[in-house]
Amino acid sequence: RERPYAGALVWGLGAPLRSSRCCRLAGMGCVESVPARTSRSSRPRLSSNHERMAPYKDEADDTSSEASDAEDAAFDAWDAMEQAEELSYLEQQLKGCSVDELMTKRFPTRGGALASPRGGGAAAHSQWSSVAAALTYDGDFALSPPYTLKKAGELYSYLRSPNAKPLPRKMVYEMLIAASHAFEAQAAACGSLIHVPPPAKPGERLLVCGDTHGQLQDVLVIFEEHGLPAPGNAYLFNGDIADRGRNATEIFVLLLAFKLACPDIMHINRGNHEQRDLNERPFANGGGFAWEVRAKYPHDELLIDLFQNLFTNLPIASLVGEWALVIHGGLFREEDVTLDDIRAIDACRQPPSVLQTRDDTLLFDALWADPHDGDGIVASDNRGGVSIQFGRDLTKAFCARNGVQSIIRSHQLPKRKRGYEIQHDAMLLTIFSASNYGGVCGNRGGVLVFDDRGPAEVKEFYAPPLDEYRALCEERALLVVMPRIAHWLACARLGPARRPQRQQSRGRRAAALASWRQLLYRVSASGVPLSPRRRRSDGPHSSWDLSPSRAALRADAAPAAEPIS
């Protein structure tokens, strides 16, 4: 199996373990099993078990100085562009330019505020439910209530298919309505801070993912490598799923499918891009989520409002036992902030454009703050001067005041093209899960793994582009099914006496019906075209009886043993 992963960072607490490869540290600290060096030529290679992943290896492996300089320039240019986009957004917020004003300029006849319901409530839910009830399932795939882990796994498999299309509108409505009710109940019970149970037994894990920004291939690769969400294998996504990439809708639906099937295995924090004003910006200006929804589901502003209702009910932070506070942006400019203060933040709203109250400031900093390597609080010039950067003294004081060991955040592309960054005497970890960010940065993505003894390691990965990743998944599926077809062809030449062997070789229980249908008009291992003879339908579980084409019946040579590639 192709594994585009490279090494691991061990980061956390616990008794020292003797190992020549990696170890835990007593006290807060870290050690890398594969050293990260500043020299690009000496950076570790991404491990791969298959030649087909060669085109997708870490671009940091290129030892050419010209290529290295070009990649560094592209990385720096993208970082500067991203900072300029968010600077522009925050400057517009200072001027009081809201999304309603922008929509008024674009659509003067609408008279300002959007006509569709805003902010949730019984009336909005009633309207969304009415729309969902009037829709019908269309397309190649549909997932309806009740939601189960099996159905969520089927959705995961469909999204890996090269033939995957936008999900049915009715399915998206029903899932968002159910998820909105679930998160509203969670917000009413827990406030803006939720408690995520840490792994309690050996073998159990909690995996923390950072920004994905609409890059579906990263989520699919993470699930492939670390396993689908399941009891004992829980996930926490730390915000910024929306914007920039073109497949945030599919990521949200996939995560919510697992959340609705089993709430304890999937947790989602809110990021600064889970808000309307940024979503309405074009892709070229750091937004795009609203326009992604409009492209896939035209003339449906209600669906955008339903997404926004979901965003406003997401928690701001998650507490993983006493090990870590997981929050998207970072810490606060206000003094003596406690966990109770975070829990009491009024987060069921769009982030404020003008910071007038302590609650406004806490909400804004939780989503927008960045760290710096010194002490104290400084203005963040690269984010418009409104947001702040917090120093290591604030991190240490916050952890001591609230009895947590560390802070885990996202929000920021790490340095040196890594999927993580450690700061503040190893008490602050930035985790970032969008590999090759924007398709140009060439950076790795990272996933933080908790086990029963706390934060254990950071796994890094590098995902191919989505269409190429899907082609690889199809190729691996063909490699499983084609040997069975080659064996069936061999049995077919032996006449009716071998009919039981032919039936067995089809592997109806081992190979999915969809895989057989996909192969009907392809070629066999020997290069002989296949043709359907007849279809037998026995209710919902229909099967295909295949026979060699006339060309195959005329062939006397034995079929080749090697499957097609």
Image (cartoon, rainbow, N blue to C red):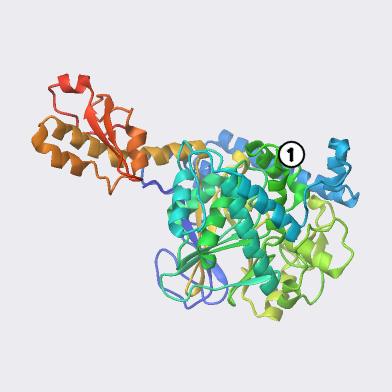
Q: Is residue 393 visible?
A: no
Seen in the image, is 438 located left or right of residue 540?
right
Q: Quadrant of the C terminus?
A: top left
Query: Hey, which quadrant is residue 300 in on the image?
Result: top right
Seen in the image, is 534 located left or right of residue 245?
left
Give the vertical position of 420 relative to 43 (above or below).
below
Position in image of residue 74 (x %, y %): 65, 38
Position in image of residue 313 (x %, y %): 70, 62
Q: Secondary structure at mark 1?
A: loop
Q: Is residue 183 visible?
A: yes
Query: Hey, which quadrant is residue 263 in on the image?
Result: bottom right
Q: Nearer the viewer, residue 206 or 397?
A: 206
Total marks placed: 1
Which residue is painted at 11% across and 37% down in the image? 498
Give the vertical position of 489 relative to 59 (above or below).
above
Query: Hey, which quadrant is residue 27 in on the image?
Result: bottom right
Position in image of residue 253 (x %, y %): 57, 51
Position in image of residue 238 (x %, y %): 62, 60
Q: Which residue is mark 1?
A: 282
Which residue is painted at 54% across and 73% down in the image? 197
Q: Amino acid at mark 1?
A: Pro
Give the vertical position of 487 relative to 9 (above or below).
above
Seen in the image, is 67 located left or right of residue 49?
right
Q: Residue furthest left?
A: 497
